[in-house]
Image (cartoon, helix red, strand yellow):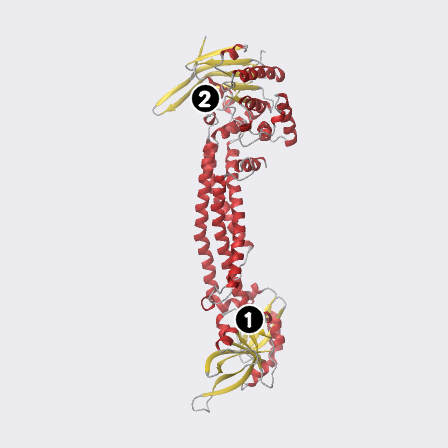
């Protein structure tokens, strides 16, 4: 504690403020740490937002079972229970691809048939409904549907508007080889799904209505599953695929954007390395400050040694000074980073900064992960310590007599 | 008075300067007795300060030895010597060398803090010393806020903090006006008697030198009779 006190007193001037040279070192380091912190928080935030958008809309696990029907749902639950070690919720769904027709325009769509009660258990889409509500009941005998915000915007759809969905089916009895079914829907809700391609194509309708469009009215595509801890999704996916196997096929939330998640991880690592170089440069700045401090304090080092201070204690004294600057710089950097992150989030809500066609998401939350904070602060302080070691050792080597000769 | 506390045997100190070697001390022998006050005088460059540094274990000789109570100091490693200085030696230098970032009280407490003495105890003793040297009203002042004489008295208090057996002073009045110089000289002898110190002083001041029981003269790294 004595050495820490001594190091601290050497850092601050008599009016209890950091000396100018130390302040400059702190400012340099805090800018580096803030950049590192913000970039980590934004990349982690992107990862979390992407993950959230997927798990909110698709569930933690997607279990597809070939030729499954509503009547086997109980057996699916039984099969899954044997492989998933924690409590889970599941909800059956039907997934179809078709066309949407409205006011003379056409576009490709995904039509999902599900029960609202079931979806509420496995997905978190209620809060994503930005207009209308999550209600698939018929209005004036026309079935209700919730549509993606991009789709609604493109076709200028509002709550209560009608549109048609055209579903093509293969048919041997038609000369074209195709048979189509047309169903009208009424918009009951407009939903922000967080992912561009979903917003542009997604239509959610009641399961019974979608089933009625199929030849085999009991068929389902599979079940959506929500877990207590979505981080185990990959583990259970592997278990289901390996141990249950055909006709089951499981996909975890990560599989929806597998390459993107990998790219984000790699990007995070590369960004860390690149910005870390900035922190290293800032640490050299601190080292030079300390080096000057050692030279300026030759007499002090000598007098401390004459009073019984050992060489390694001198090393510790100056290293502690470096570490203190590192610590203050890191904390200041974290605070600056917090401010910048807040500004980033605020700017996003004011202006459309993130083009969703490019980044898959339209809003990036910042995510402060302990591991990121510990890595940023720990590595900055470690580099600070290493860079101050050299001047500290130089000070320790000083012969006590050298600094006493002249004033 | 008959116990030898400090003994130098054939002390040689050479410095390399480029290709040349400077012989600063050329085989100095010296015995200093417990409680003795010794003054070393001589012209600048005679080697007085170098000898003082060697006797105080601040530097190592090129050859020869220094014995403290019969024990060869330079057989110890640097860490052991640091501890030895902390416990047994007190130093006062011409340029006081107070730590400018610390108050008078903190400066005086420093040797005790280095030897891990409890803060409260160290503070009490430092305040007593400052009071004794007439500086109690200056205890929270920084060196830059004090006069030369006051600074030197703080340095003396600091040297006495750990109850040293030997007090070394290198030109302690060299930087003071005559009034302050006289006051400091008297103070040295008062403190020597009070604390039973052995005192080794280097000075140019003939008047000060005459106050000592033993005066040794150096010239060109050797004793002069």
Viewer can see residue B64: no
**Relative side of A399 to B90, left or right:** left
Closest to the observer: A234 or A349? Answer: A349
* Label 2 environment density (alpha carbons within 10 Å; few <14, some 14–19, many ≥20): many
Viewer can see residue A24: yes
User: Which image quarter holds the N terminus of chain A?
Assistant: top right
Identify the chain of the residue marked 2, using the numbered disc in the image: B
Provide the residue designation for mark 1: A57
Provide the residue designation for mark 2: B61
Are tags 2 and 1 found on a single chain?
A: no
What residue appears at the point 47 percent right and 61 percent down from the top-left corner? Answer: A264
Q: Residue B47, position in %: x, y? A: 44, 17
Q: Disc 2 on helix, strand or loop?
A: loop
Which corner quadrant of the image does residue A266 belong to? bottom left
**Relative side of A280 to B82, left or right:** left
* Label 1 environment density (alpha carbons within 10 Å; few <14, some 14–19, many ≥20): many
Q: Residue A102, position in %: x, y? A: 49, 82
Does residue A397 sit above or below B198 in this rendering?
below
What residue appears at the point 46 percent right and 89 percent down from the top-left corner? Answer: A172
Closest to the observer: A211 or B215? Answer: B215
**Relative side of B217 to A143, left or right:** left
What residue appears at the point 44 percent right and 56 percent down from the top-left corner? Answer: A270
Q: Residue A79, position in %: x, y? A: 60, 73
Which corner quadrant of the image does residue A291 belong to? top left
Q: Residue B96, position in %: x, y? A: 52, 24
Q: Disc 1 on helix, strand or loop?
A: helix
Closest to the observer: B194 or A379? Answer: B194
Does residue A287 sit above or below A87 in this rendering?
above
Q: Nearer the viewer, mark 2 or mark 1?
A: 1
Identify the chain of the residue marked 1, using the numbered disc in the image: A
């Amino acid at each position: 504690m004595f050495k820490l006190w001594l190091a601290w007193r050497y850092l601050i001037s008599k009016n209890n403020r950091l000396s100018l040279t130390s302040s400059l070192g702190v400012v340099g380091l805090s800018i580096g740490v803030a950049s590192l912190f913000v970039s980590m928080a934004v990349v982690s935030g992107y990862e979390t937002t992407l993950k959230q958008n997927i798990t909110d809309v698709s569930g933690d696990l997607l279990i597809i079972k070939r030729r499954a029907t509503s009547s086997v749902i109980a057996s699916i639950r039984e099969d899954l229970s044997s492989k998933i070690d924690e409590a889970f919720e599941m909800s059956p769904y039907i997934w179809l691809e078709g066309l949407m027709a409205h006011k003379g325009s056409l576009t490709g769509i995904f039509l999902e048939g599900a029960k609202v009660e079931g979806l509420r258990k496995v997905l978190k889409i209620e809060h994503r409904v930005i207009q209308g509500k999550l209600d698939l009941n018929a209005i004036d005998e026309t079935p209700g549907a919730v549509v993606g915000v991009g789709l609604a915007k493109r076709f200028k759809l509002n709550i209560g508007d009608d549109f048609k969905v055209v579903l093509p089916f293969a048919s041997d009895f038609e000369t074209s080889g195709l048979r189509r079914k047309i169903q009208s829907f009424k918009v009951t809700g407009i939903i922000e799904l967080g992912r561009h391609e979903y917003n542009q194509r997604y239509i959610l309708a009641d399961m019974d209505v979608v089933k009625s469009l199929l030849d085999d009215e009991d068929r389902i595509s599979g079940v959506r599953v929500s877990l207590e801890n979505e981080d185990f999704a990959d583990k259970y996916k592997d278990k289901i695929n390996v141990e249950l196997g055909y006709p089951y096929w499981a996909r975890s939330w990560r599989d929806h954007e597998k390459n993107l998640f990998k790219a984000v991880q790699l990007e995070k690592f590369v960004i860390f390395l690149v910005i870390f170089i900035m922190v290293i440069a800032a640490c050299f700045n601190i080292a030079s400050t300390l080096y000057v401090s050692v030279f300026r304090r030759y007499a002090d080092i000598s007098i401390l040694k004459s009073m019984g201070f050992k060489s390694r204690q001198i090393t510790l004294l100056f290293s502690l000074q470096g570490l203190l600057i590192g610590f203050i710089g890191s904390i200041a950097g974290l605070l600056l980073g917090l401010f910048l992150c807040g500004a980033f989030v605020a700017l996003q809500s004011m202006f459309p900064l993130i083009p969703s066609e490019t980044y898959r998401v339209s809003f990036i939350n910042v995510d402060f992960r302990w591991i990121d904070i510990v890595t940023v602060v720990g590595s900055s302080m470690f580099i600070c310590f290493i860079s101050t070691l050299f001047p500290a050792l130089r000070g320790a080597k000083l012969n006590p007599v050298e600094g006493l000769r002249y004033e | 008075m008959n116990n030898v506390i400090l003994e130098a045997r054939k002390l040689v100190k050479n410095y390399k300067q480029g290709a040349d070697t400077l012989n600063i001390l050329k085989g100095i022998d010296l015995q200093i007795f417990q409680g003795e006050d010794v003054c070393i005088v001589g012209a600048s460059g005679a080697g007085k300060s170098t000898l003082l540094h060697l006797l105080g274990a601040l530097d190592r000789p090129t050859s020869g030895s220094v014995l403290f109570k019969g024990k060869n100091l330079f057989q110890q490693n640097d860490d052991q010597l640091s501890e030895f200085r902390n416990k047994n030696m007190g130093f006062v230098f011409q340029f006081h060398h107070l730590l400018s970032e610390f108050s008078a009280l903190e400066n005086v407490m420093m040797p005790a803090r280095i030897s891990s003495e409890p803060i409260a105890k160290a503070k009490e003793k430092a305040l007593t010393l400052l009071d004794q040297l007439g500086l109690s009203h200056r205890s929270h002042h920084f060196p830059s806020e004090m006069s030369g004489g006051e600074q030197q008295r703080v340095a003396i208090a600091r040297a006495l903090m750990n109850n040293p057996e030997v007090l070394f002073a290198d030109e302690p009045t060299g930087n003071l006006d005559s009034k302050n110089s006289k006051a400091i000289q008297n103070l040295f002898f008062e403190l020597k008697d009070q604390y039973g110190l052995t005192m080794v002083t280097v000075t140019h001041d003939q008047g000060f030198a005459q106050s000592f029981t033993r005066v040794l003269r150096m010239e060109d790294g050797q004793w002069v009779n």
